[in-house]
Image (cartoon, rainbow, N blue to C red):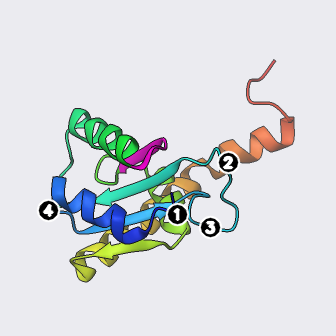
């Protein structure tokens, strides 16, 4: 079954009507999709979603679509994961463009600060060729 963005949006909004934005990332829905591709989704809402509620929604979507679904709550995700989601630039729903773009901008700033903070550490790892010193 081909799973359209609208099908995804409709089902998520039915469960979480306050969502500001929904993103699709990963290989599903792209030319790189294969039979084993799961559906990678991320949601941005006004406040963090309880991890149990997020997991239950992912399981519900998986049952409906008959495919594994990974669902990320962007309010709770790390800067690295948020940047991975936004790097795919596949926002499939947006109820509040200002708040969504503001969050994306803050994520980019967080990611840049993180990379600056770990630059020396990553340089040492690259130079040594391993993570731990001997």
Mark-to-mark CA distance, 4 and 2: 43 Å
Query: Position of 133 compared to 120: left or right?
Result: right
Position above or below: 48 against 101? above
Query: Position of 104 compared to 131: left or right?
Result: left
Of the pair 73 and 124, the residue shown nearer to us:
73
Position above or below: 86 against 12? below
Q: Earlier in the sequence, mark 1 or mark 3?
A: 3
What residue span does the magenta drawing correspond to?
Answer: 65-72
Picture disc at residue 30: 3
Residue of label 1: 112
Q: Earlier in the sequence, mark 4 or mark 2?
A: 4
Picture disc at residue 120: 2
Check if mark 3's residue and mark 2's residue have beta carbons within 8 Å.
Answer: no
Of the pair 7 and 71, the residue shown nearer to us:
7
Q: Residues within 10 Å of mark 3 (few under 14, many from 20)?
A: few
Of the pair 3 and 17, the residue shown nearer to us:
3
Residue of label 4: 17
């Amino acid at each position: 079954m081909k799973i359209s963005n609208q099908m995804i949006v409709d089902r998520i909004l039915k469960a979480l009507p306050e969502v500001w934005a929904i993103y699709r990332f990963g290989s599903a829905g792209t030319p790189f999709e294969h039979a084993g591709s799961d559906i990678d989704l991320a949601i941005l809402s006004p406040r963090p979603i309880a991890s149990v509620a997020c997991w239950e929604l992912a399981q519900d979507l998986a049952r409906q679509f008959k495919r594994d679904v990974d669902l990320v709550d962007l309010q709770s995700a790390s800067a690295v994961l948020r940047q991975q989601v936004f790097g795919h630039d596949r926002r499939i729903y947006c109820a509040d463009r200002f708040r969504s773009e503001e969050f994306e901008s803050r994520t980019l700033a967080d990611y840049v600060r993180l990379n600056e903070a770990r630059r020396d550490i990553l340089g040492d790892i690259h130079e040594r060729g391993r993570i731990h010193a001997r």
